[in-house]
Amino acid sequence: MNLSFWEKSTFFAEIDVAIIGSGLVGLNAAISLKILRPNWKIIILEKGILPSGASTRNAGFACVGSPSELLDDLTHQTENEVFSTVEKRWKGLEKLLKRVGERGLDFQKNGGYELFLKQDDALYNDCQNQLDFLNKNLASIVGVVDNFKLVNRKSFGFRGLEKQIFIQQEGQINTGKMMQSLVNLATEKGIKIYNGITVTDFQDFKTHVELTTENGWQLNAQRLFIATNGFTRRLLPTLEIHPARNQVLITKPIKNLKFKGTFHLNKGYYYFRNFENRVLFGGGRHLDKAGETTEQFGTTDLIQNSLKTILKENILPDQQFEIEQWWSGILGVGKQKTPIVEQYSENITVAVRLSGIGVAISSLVADEGVELCLG
């Protein structure tokens, strides 16, 4: 179905910037662009009815990294690269809080914890031995000298998770409220979000960029901003980024739930938190990295069974609970956690590869892309 003359000359006429993707990066980029260029016409094209990927499907951790996650990063990145990423996470969270506000995020600073199963004794010992080193490097970033502390909180009611490291500068948010707040802010500023439009191709003609959609529409914009994260290879197959699926569950309300906060296991591959009096628990993609390198949403028995076992035996032992819902999200990851923010061509900017830390770094990544977009 072709666009009518009326549609083409009103909805899609004289576009200054077209943004592909209405997730965290796309929305933040649109808002920042509109603040800097209030007279520009900025539209967002989103293939899903809601943002597709991870922005509305993450666990809502406001974190800069657990000890084992950072030590694992140091095995394949330099110290400068790792702690520069931590700084981006911290500054990105500050920027997001400033933009949306604590109420808009339902931000709660209950602190976080890294927990260790009995089979992870060697990992715990490595973290324990490196805490001073990590705290020293984090102090100037997060503003405290002892962000990581050895603790033992038996009051949580866990079993087999007695070895714990407290993470002082960590909080949690309501993912749905965060995204709704950003959508509302974008709409208030006159940014148009068009859902159900899949861009399949584009070409930079120097004077403008031409976009082709799945239903055959030809749209023109002065500039294009690509914020497609886990689905980027559909448009840019040569970029060093691939999709990674994360599976998540949430329980029904649990009477007298004994803990609050965010919790990490096994280098961040497992993670859980309270949401009010429920437990939200996700991860496990390290059990089948090849199978979870997919753009397809869904769950698998292997990872479901792993999450249910840890939930029953370690997190909620001797407690009655029911799982209310399962879902999955698609991340954009690569060999490194460094995001890809680059000028693809004269009028096309790319800001992708959030590496599962999009809540923290998306605001900063978006603004870096905006700087490039504006030249």
Image (cartoon, helix red, strand yellow):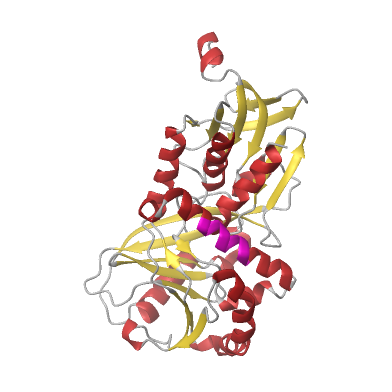
Quadrant in which the N terminus appears: top right
> Quarter-wise, where is residue 112 in the image?
bottom left
Quadrant in which the C terminus appears: top right
Magenta range is 86-94
Residue 2 visible here: no
Name the spot of residue 198 as percent of width and height, x first: 57, 32
Compared across the picture, whether 293 is left or right of 177 comes to right
Residue lying furthest top: 5
Q: Residue at x 38, y 81 (%)?
A: 313
Name the spot of residue 131 as percent of width and height, x first: 59, 85
Q: State the residue in front, 310 or 25.
A: 25
Q: State the residue in front, 246 or 134.
A: 134
Residue 122 visible here: yes
Q: State the residue in front, 253 or 322.
A: 253
Q: State the residue in front, 85 or 245.
A: 85
Vertical order, 72 against 196 (above or below)? below
Question: Would you say the magenta stretch is mainly helix, strand or loop?
Answer: helix
Name the spot of residue 177 as percent of width and height, x first: 37, 50
> How many numbered dots are placed on residues in this image?
0
Vertical order, 126 against 206 (above or below)? below
Compared across the picture, whether 311 is left or right of 51 comes to left
Instruction: Check if residue 1 falls in the magenta segment.
Output: no
Name the spot of residue 328 as percent of width and height, x first: 47, 55
Q: Residue at x 48, y 84 (%)?
A: 117
Residue lying furthest left: 255
> Quarter-wise, where is residue 44 in the image?
top right
Instruction: Check if residue 92 falls in the magenta segment.
Output: yes
Q: Residue at x 55, y 85 (%)?
A: 120
Q: Residue at x 73, y 53 (%)?
A: 240
